[in-house]
Image (cartoon, helix red, strand yellow):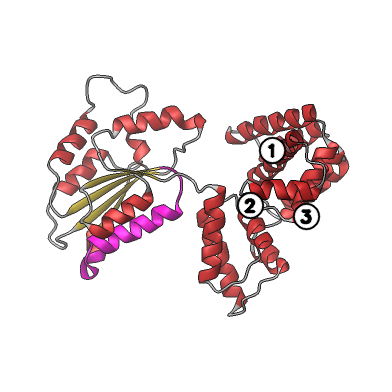
Amino acid sequence: MKPQEFVGRIKQSAPAPVYLFLGPEMHRRRVCRRLLIEKHLPLESREEGFTRYDLEEIALIDVLDDALSLSLFAAKRLIWASSAEAALPKGALPDREELPAQAALRDYVNRPTPGVVIVFDSSRITYNAEDKSKMERLRKFYAAIPNVVEFHPYTEEEARKLAAEQAHRAGLQLGAAQLESLVESLGYDASRIVIEIEKLSCYAGGEATVSDEVIAALTPDARTATVFALVAALSRGDRGRSFELLQALVRDGEYLPLVLRSLSTQLRYALAAQEEGLRSASQVQNFFAKQGIAMWPSRAQQVHQLVTAFPQSRLEAAIQAVHEADKKLRDRSPDDRIVIEKLVLALT
């Protein structure tokens, strides 16, 4: 089920005895956890009733043993078992036979302790293609749990909507370009969006308007102007300027995978604009607006600059090079900066 469905069920009825939380998204996960605590645990016994375990440090069977034990201090309990993926054995799971931990989990799900809710939480395995086999093994291991909540990352549109809602709630007047810049620079990460808007609200001190300079100063990764300048330098084939801008991003503590994501987005937009035969920045802006993609004039100009600088074959090769660099960043490379520097060399 989706987190929204979980929230609806919890508000209407008592929680299920056992849940499996899957996926890397943390903002909705925190919302669900907070609601579960408020709904299930009485305020006066909340501290005694909440127990946290890490399955990297304790066996799954020991968690179930604790759940089966009656508490002298709390009539209702919530047991949160994080790192659920750590309970999986090495190698393939047996097709027909159950492992002892699986059998114990199935027995508990069939006869849970009244008043006890267990959440097995796995946030490290993503929904990316690289983790597909790991996710399948995880689902198979916890197949006895019928209530599975999946926390997919926010889409770009969902992240923009969240940012607008958070800004409105905080009383901040952020323009469409400011919101887009902030959301993109934070990698569409909902948790980081909430935190950064809260920081902006505290700094504003009741003032509704926030300048671009304040956003750049308070948000460590909100340096899209430098990222866009890097994209422009790459489009010109200016290797020296590209390395200067990369050095500036590294010096300012920019998270390089986000730089790569911004570059990938620009290249994909440029390829789409080229395939549509768009011949001006205004045409680029109007085309993407019809697709539901917010794009302000300066960014449309940058996309158009890429269209004019890169022939289609070079754009496709650049996108492929970015894809290969992204895979290397996910490996145990010696340094993310080396990967990006090699990409700059390849594109210039």
Q: Is residue 115 left or right of residue 214?
A: left
Label pair 3/2, CB-CB below 8 angstroms: no
- Whether residue 117 is visible here, answered yes or no, is yes
Q: Amino acid at mark 3?
A: Ser
Q: Magenta part of the protein: which range?
A: 23-46
Answer above or below: position of 331 versus 289: above
Name the residue nearer the viewer: 327 or 208: 208
How would you rate the neighbour count of disc 1 (Cα within 10 Å): few for under 14, some for 14-19, many for 20 or more?
Answer: some
Label pair 3/1, CB-CB below 8 angstroms: no
Secondary structure mostly seen in magenta is helix
Q: Is residue 279 magenta?
A: no
Label pair 2/1, CB-CB below 8 angstroms: no
Q: Which residue is mark 1?
A: 268
Looking at the rendering, which quadrant does residue 205 occupy?
A: bottom right
Looking at the rendering, which quadrant does residue 221 occupy?
A: bottom right
Q: Is residue 74 left or right of residue 251?
A: left
Q: On residue 196, which mark appears? A: none
Query: Which mark lies nearer to you, 2 or 1?
Result: 1
Q: Is residue 33 magenta?
A: yes
Name the residue nearer the viewer: 309 or 228: 309
Q: Earlier in the sequence, mark 3 or mark 1?
A: 1
Query: x%, y% of residue 29?
Result: 40, 52
Q: Residue at x 73, y 67 (%)?
A: 213
Q: Which residue is mark 3?
A: 298
